[in-house]
Image: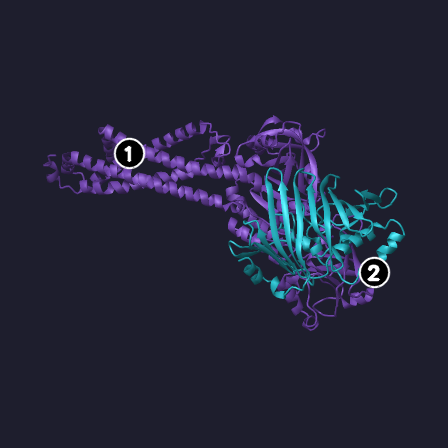
Chain colours: A purple, B cyan
């Protein structure tokens, strides 16, 4: 084998010009393949790591109110953060993410913007902080200005936004937005910094300190917006982490236990909410067929068991109140209900319960989250085997894990059909939130590969042709070697190795060429303001992200193509009878 | 421009319903209140509520003219049907051309948006905008003004109601504060005619006290003992120059067939 290798390598040097030209063609093909692959990876990198990471985290936990994705609020924030930290291993950070659509008035100009909370205090990883500062490079002011108390609601905005609002450092702007309750609010904000984003998509946000924004938007001390979870190696860990979190987020039954009061009388009672979608209402009515034969359960009903009603002297139309301990501690809080019907005694509907419709239930429940009731204190807490269980309100609605953007959008569209006022909790990863980007990258790679394979086909025609010429020129040499005792397969392998080495060296040169080309192209400053190609750029430069795995896979592919195309001429050479070969004159 | 009406006689509020049979009581009550001097805030809010809430089925043509700085004028026309018994409603857009044939249908807890070009219904939420205006689905819910707002009291506990003049018209000026979270504006000031308790002007404020919107109710039409503000203007006080004019015409209080509040009817109407 050693001698074959030596002969093959020596032969490569015998026809220098021909092999050089052929090698150059292969090298250029390889360079194009590597560069195209790095470019499509670069697009994904820009979209995932320079945009999506900031707008959806590696994993996000969303809390959608009333099916409105822009209305993100969960009133038991600490509990949720604790649950996340317990469930997802190796968390780099859990950040609150609040974005609010707003209208901004600058100096005689107006524009739309998204007010985004920035939590620099909880960002302790210097690398991520550096990444952030690179992606939002300040050209005026400083990040520390967000914490300044002498400025009224300090904000950082992009140079483009500052231009469209005709505003400068320390100018005061007015913003209008809707708070967490949907009320219109207005505020004055001060320009404390102007940044140049690495990507055109990041021109829209106007950054405020998260604490400031929460205060302006009416968030309470224990309220949170969306949560963004950052984890190391998200490509590997994000989906398993989200799956684990989804299991842990299975919502428990929602209930409040306290004293139901009416006209000075009081009795311990559990308040349970019932779901009001048509299927649930029908299901509940089936549990008490006699009673519901005459009465149709409505989505605004508040029902009380007969024993409880009798003990308080309650009748339909009476307004009673439930006093219960809130989870946050302190004095009991009161929720009031107007009873619409008194239920007869039934084993399915226990006596010490007030059954509250979904809307009324969540209104008081989320305003003052009740302390978890204990069955040992007399609270009625049906378990999952109870016939009532499927029709009762949970602390939140857990959305299915979606695998694509389309699935996620479809699930969100279906939310209003539940007619529930419960918060819908979702756990998407950035790969699912933007599956179309992965599809785009996949499509780009496929197109690139297809184009390069065609290119290589053309190159390989050249390889075949060259080999045939070589064989023709070296026919007598083949005859001599065969006469000296060289076997057929050795002759074939000699030519195969020659092609293999030519392709291998060319591939290495191609990779070097590709890296040089990428370096060169990424140095060119591209001015494309207002152009959609902006999305492909980082700080005005093309962004390449070469993939070691991709490159490593391309090499054997190209070598295999070279070997296959070289096989047939090599075999022809090997099959030449020595006598015929020795007598060849050409 | 805001066109929400849950809390005041806004563009759509008169098209909502409330309980019947209180008319005589309220008239007597109001007369007594006037005779006794400045009525209480609750009396005024109750009377506003009573004056403007219809108690019959309604069919009307609603025209909105939105003027936004730098964007020109946009006319939005729609046909509106409302059933009194359960507050079901149907809206079909007739202008502009881009919206023509699109519609909204609310029956009980179901709220659908219909898109003519795709001929599809989509379930939407109660807080979603209607036809690009600031009106929401929940604006059409039957909520009483007195459940949403109460009169602001000063440090001595006195209600902030004063006798005032709006031009040459004697009015009560009442400052109101929201009792619940889910209203558009947490603070309002009403200028209400002293003789018949019709709102002539309304200002809406944020929690911090910024004036956001002023509404003028230019013309009322008496229908079935109630008053319909058929001409209104909403001025955007935040973004000066933006305004919306609202006109209601072709009002009918005849009972509407049950078939109207169906998907099939909306689809048919949009053709």
Left or right, B164 with reference to A96: right
- The one nearer the camera, A231 or B102, is B102
Report x, y in % for residue A357.
Answer: 70, 60
Q: Chain of mark 2?
A: B
Q: Position of residue A87 (x, y in %)?
A: 60, 47
The answer to whether residue B24 is seen in the rendering is yes
Q: Do residues under tags 1 and 2 come within 8 Å of each other at their CB atoms? A: no
Q: CA distance from mark 1 to mark 2?
A: 103 Å
Please tell me which residue is depicted at 60% across the width and 31% down the height of the picture: A162
Q: Report the quarter where the N terminus of chain A lies.
A: top left
Instruction: Report x, y in % for residue B237.
Output: 70, 39
Disc 1, SS: helix
* Mark 1 crowdedness (10 Å alpha carbons): few <14, some 14-19, many ≥20: many
Query: How many marks do you count on the picture?
Result: 2
- Where's residue A101, x and y in %? 62, 41
Q: Nearer the viewer, residue A382 or A493?
A: A382
Give the mark toward the camera: 1 or 2: 2
**Left or right: A45, with A105 as reference point:** left
Q: Which residue is mark 1?
A: A502
Q: Nearer the viewer, residue A468 or A14?
A: A468
Image quadrant in which the C terminus of chain A is located: top left
Element under disc 2: helix
Chain for numbered disc 1: A
Residue at 87% from the left image edge and 53% from the top image edge: B33
Residue B204 falls left or right of residue A385: right
Q: Quadrant of residue A463?
A: top left
Q: Quadrant of residue A187?
A: top right
Which residue is denoted by mark 2 in the rendering? B25
């Amino acid at each position: 084998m050693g001698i074959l290798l030596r002969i093959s390598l020596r032969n490569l040097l015998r026809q220098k010009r021909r092999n050089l030209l052929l090698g150059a063609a292969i090298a250029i093909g390889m360079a194009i393949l590597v560069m195209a692959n790095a470019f499509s990876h670069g697009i994904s990198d820009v979209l995932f790591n320079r945009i999506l990471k900031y707008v959806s985290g590696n994993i996000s936990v969303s809390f959608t109110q009333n099916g409105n994705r822009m209305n993100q609020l969960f009133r038991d924030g600490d509990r949720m953060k604790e649950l996340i930290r317990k469930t997802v291993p190796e968390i780099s950070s859990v950040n609150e993410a609040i974005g609010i659509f707003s209208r901004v008035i600058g100096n005689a100009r107006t524009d739309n913007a998204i007010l985004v909370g920035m939590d620099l205090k909880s960002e302790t990883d210097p690398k991520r902080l550096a990444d952030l500062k690179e992606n939002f490079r300040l050209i005026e002011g400083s990040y520390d200005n967000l914490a300044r108390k002498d400025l009224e609601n300090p904000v950082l905005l992009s140079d483009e936004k500052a231009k469209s609002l005709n505003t400068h450092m320390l100018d005061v702007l007015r913003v209008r937005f809707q708070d967490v309750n949907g009320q219109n609010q207005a505020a004055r904000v001060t320009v404390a910094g102007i940044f140049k984003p690495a990507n055109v998509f990041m021109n829209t946000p106007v950054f405020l300190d998260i604490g400031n924004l929460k205060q302006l938007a009416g968030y309470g001390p224990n309220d949170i917006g969306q949560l963004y979870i950052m984890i190391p190696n998200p490509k590997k860990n994000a989906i398993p982490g989200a799956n684990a979190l989804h299991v842990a987020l299975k919502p428990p039954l929602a209930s409040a236990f306290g004293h139901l009061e009416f006209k000075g009388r009081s009795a311990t009672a559990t308040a349970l909410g019932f779901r009001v979608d048509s299927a649930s209402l029908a299901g509940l009515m089936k549990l008490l067929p006699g009673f519901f034969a005459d009465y149709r359960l409505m989505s605004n009903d508040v029902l009380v068991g007969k024993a409880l009603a009798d003990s308080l002297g309650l009748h339909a139309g009476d307004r009673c109140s439930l006093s219960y301990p809130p989870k946050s501690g302190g004095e009991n809080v009161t929720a009031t209900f107007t009873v619409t019907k008194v239920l007869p005694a039934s084993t399915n509907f226990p006596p010490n319960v007030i059954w509250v419709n979904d809307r009324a239930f969540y209104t008081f429940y989320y305003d003052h989250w009740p302390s978890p009731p204990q069955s040992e204190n007399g609270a009625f807490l049906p378990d999952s085997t109870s016939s009532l269980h499927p029709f009762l309100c949970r602390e939140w609605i857990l959305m299915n894990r979606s695998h694509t953007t389309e699935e996620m959008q479809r699930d969100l569209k279906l939310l209003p059909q539940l007619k529930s006022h419960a918060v819908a909790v979702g756990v998407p990863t950035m790969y699912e939130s933007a599956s179309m980007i992965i599809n785009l990258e996949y499509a780009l790679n496929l197109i690139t590969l297809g184009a390069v394979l065609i290119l290589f086909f053309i190159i390989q025609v050249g390889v075949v042709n060259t080999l045939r010429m070589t064989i023709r020129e070296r026919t007598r040499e083949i005859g001599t070697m065969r006469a000296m005792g060289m076997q057929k397969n050795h002759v074939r392998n000699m030519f195969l190795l020659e092609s293999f080495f030519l392709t291998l060296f060319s591939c290495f040169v191609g990779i070097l060429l590709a890296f040089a080309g990428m370096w060169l192209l990424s140095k060119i400053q591209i001015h494309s303001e207002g152009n959609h190609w902006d999305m492909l750029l980082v700080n005005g430069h093309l962004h390449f992200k070469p993939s070691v795995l991709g490159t490593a896979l391309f090499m054997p592919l190209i070598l295999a193509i070279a070997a296959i195309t070289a096989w047939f001429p090599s075999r022809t050479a090997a099959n030449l009878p020595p006598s015929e070969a020795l007598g060849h004159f050409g | 421009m805001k066109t929400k009406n849950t809390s005041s006689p806004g563009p759509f509020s008169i098209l909502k319903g409330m309980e019947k049979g209180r008319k005589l009581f309220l008239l007597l009550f109001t007369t007594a209140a006037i005779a006794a001097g400045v009525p209480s805030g609750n009396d005024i809010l109750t009377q506003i509520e009573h004056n403007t809430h219809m108690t019959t089925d309604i069919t009307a043509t609603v025209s909105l003219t939105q003027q936004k700085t730098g964007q020109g004028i946009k006319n939005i026309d729609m046909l509106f049907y409302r059933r009194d018994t359960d507050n079901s409603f149907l809206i079909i857009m007739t202008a502009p051309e881009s919206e023509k044939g699109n519609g909204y249908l609310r029956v009980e807890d179901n709220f659908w948006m219909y898109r003519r070009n795709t001929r599809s219904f989509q379930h939407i939420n109660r807080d979603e905008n209607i036809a690009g205006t600031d009106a929401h689905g929940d604006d059409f819910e039957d909520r009483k003004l007195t459940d949403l707002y109460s009169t602001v009291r000063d440090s001595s506990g006195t209600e902030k109601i004063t006798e005032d003049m709006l031009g040459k018209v004697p009015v009560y000026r009442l400052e109101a504060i929201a009792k619940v979270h889910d209203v558009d504006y947490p603070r309002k000031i009403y200028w209400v005619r002293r003789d018949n308790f019709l709102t002539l002007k309304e200002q809406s404020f944020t929690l911090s006290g910024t004036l956001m919107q002023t509404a003028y109710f230019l013309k009322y039409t008496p229908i079935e003992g109630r008053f319909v503000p058929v001409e209104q203007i909403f001025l955007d006080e935040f973004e000066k120059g933006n305004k919306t004019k609202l006109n209601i015409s072709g009002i009918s209080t005849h009972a509407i067939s049950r078939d109207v509040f169906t998907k099939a009817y909306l689809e048919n109407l949009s053709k």
